[in-house]
Image (spheres, rainbow, N blue to C red):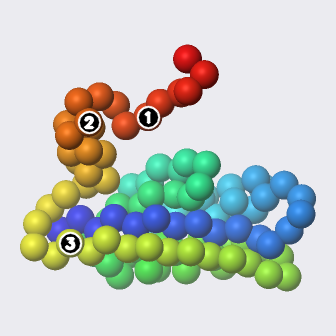
Amino acid sequence: MTVVALLSVAPVTEESMAGEVAKAVDALDEFDVRYETNPMGTVIEAAEVEEIFAAAQAAHMAVDGDRVSTFLKIDDKRTSEGTASEKVDAVERELGRTASGNPDE
């Protein structure tokens, strides 16, 4: 089974969050997860949901600040295998093109 999750961890601050977000992402390396960071969060994949929860907790705890905001959305499809990239591939097949665009081009 592959569990896919979207994780966003950030300090509540008016200044740049990049340093603290980097700490959260770095904490994921201690777990048996695959991940890819994008501008809105980090997509995490693991074989078991417990690993996702443990990695998310470590990422949350790695951020310094008086207030930390964490969002975790989990897709635990228990009846079949499927990676995050396969989900994107399926959408792109339906579109007949890549699932990205640049209106300025």
Q: CA distance from mark 1 to mark 2?
A: 10 Å
Q: Amino acid at mark 2?
A: Leu
Q: Give residue 100's position: percent from left, percent from top.
A: 44, 34
According to the picture, the residue beneath numbered tag 1 turns out to be: 100
Tell me whether the residue at label 2 lies in contact with that at label 3, contact meaning CB atoms closer than 8 angstroms. Answer: no
- Counting from the top left corner in percent of width and height, residue 97 is at 29, 28
* Mark nearer the N terminus (2 vs 3): 3
Image-based side of 52 in relation to 61, left or right: left
Q: Which of the pair 45/39 is nearer the observer?
A: 39
Amino acid bearing label 3: Lys
Quadrant the N terminus occupies: bottom left
Residue under circle 3?
77
Q: Quadrant of residue 75?
A: bottom left
Dot placed on the residue nearer the N-terminal end, 3 or 1 = 3
Q: Give x and y (percent) for residue 59.
A: 60, 71
Badge 2 is on which residue?
Answer: 95
Q: Is residue 35 above or below residue 102?
A: below
Image point (58%, 66%), residue name: 8
**Label 1 CA crowd tier, 10 Å (few <14, some 14–19, many 20+):** few
Which residue is at the far front?
103
Answer with left or right where residue 95 lies relative to residue 20: left
Is mark 3 in CB contact (under 8 Å) with mark 1?
Answer: no
Residue at position x 77%, y 71% from top? Answer: 11
Disc 1 residue type (three-letter): Ser
The mark that comes first in sequence, 1 or 2, is 2
- 26 or 93: nearer the viewer: 93
Is residue 30 in view from this perspective? no
Residue at 89% over, 59% down: 15
Q: Name the mark nearer the viewer: 3 or 1.
A: 1
Disc 1 or disc 2, which is closer to the eye? 2
Residue 2 in the image: state x and y as whole percent. Answer: 23, 65
